[in-house]
Image: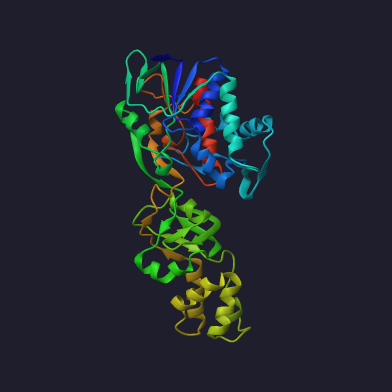
Amino acid sequence: MIHKFDALILGGGAAGLMCAIEAGRRGRRVAILEHAERLGKKILVSGGGRCNFTNIYCSAENFISANPHFAKSALARYAPEDFIALVKKHHIPYHEKTLGQLFCDRSAQDILDMLEKECRGCGVQLFTKTAIQKLMRTDEFVATAGQREFRAPALVVATGGLSIPKMGATGFGYDLARQFGVRIRETRPGLVPLLFSAEDVRHYADLAGVSAEVIAACDGQSFREKMLLTHRGLSGPAILQISTYWRKPGSISIDLAPEQVVTVELLESAVPRNIASLRAALRRFLPNRFADRWLEIHAPKSWTNSSLQQLESSIHSWAVLPAGTEGYGKAEVTAGGVDTDELSPKTMESRKIPGLFFIGEVVDVTGHLGGFNFQWAWASGASAGRAL
């Protein structure tokens, strides 16, 4: 059976759905082809099931790309307030958490229901359980799925990245890009927990569950948020943020007590210089178990000012040399992807292949934690949808 449309969108996630809505509103006959049994699976699990759907402080500086300017056009053309207006139109209650992050009050299902309703309202046809076995380009794009054939002059690749394969993530989008001669920037797990070295596992693994506010820094970037110790390494927002900048075999630096002088009372001789007073000082700024372990490992060799200052310095510049990351299985996003030099920043269309578009996570644009990757999905999807 042959199905003809004005545009085919491969992938029914955030970017694909937004693209379909924008194109459908403009009278285009659009089909979304999704290989999974339902649309928006990653939307449903995002934000702990409440969907951190955007960030009100979104700017191009919140994104990583080989071309840091590429995202500016799309982000300017579809801003957080545009998506918020859509949320309000559907009367979805939401709230702001820290640092401008917006979440649904009830469930991420509200966002997915809204997007599906908008698609239906503008005539978008949704095909789930539709895995593409073959894709060709003659005078139009031809996608074969079982006994069905889908044809259209425009093809939008919104297949996502490699993160969370248990939810169906594959490298299909990258394979398509290579098929058409579109360059790929090396991919890697982004927003992902880091693994301890064998030595650090021995020192800290039994502290799993302990958390603290820290500043994590690497490659000229730094983030002040929570850090969480795990059985295998480090996680929490600060670590996920910095992980996207980290490259093996480099290190990350962690300030465990930002803007505090932990040993000030001892240095000023206000209290006796002994282990008991030092432990009490550390426990004022660090979780008790972590403070005690830190003191075991970094106990001063003497009670001189110099030794105390060395201890102080170690607290503000803990050098962690990760053994690696938890990989795509635990990564929230895939960094790298379709080279932005291959695409128009206004439309997301390939510069080489007319009618071929790439949007969302498959592109080499990776947002920080906190709603920015959803905003890139909405913005890049809207840009391509309007261009269709």
Question: Which quadrant holds residue 198?
Answer: bottom left
196, above or below 30, in the image: below
Any part of residue 263 in sight: no
* Residue depicted at x 61% and y 32%: 83
Residue 320 image point, x, y percent:
41, 63
Q: Residue 74 versus residue 96: which sits nearer the camera? A: 96
Residue 14 or residue 188, whichever sits in front: 14
Residue 117 visible here = yes
- Residue 65: where, in percent of width, then height? 43, 40
Q: Residue at x 49, y 34 (%)?
A: 71
Residue 344 in the image, given as x and y percentages of width and height: 44, 26
Where 311 falls versus 243 (above or below)?
below
Depth check: 233 or 62 in front?
A: 233
Who is closer to the viewer here, 123 or 278? 123
Q: What color scheme is it?
A: rainbow
Image spot of residue 207 (x, y percent): 48, 68
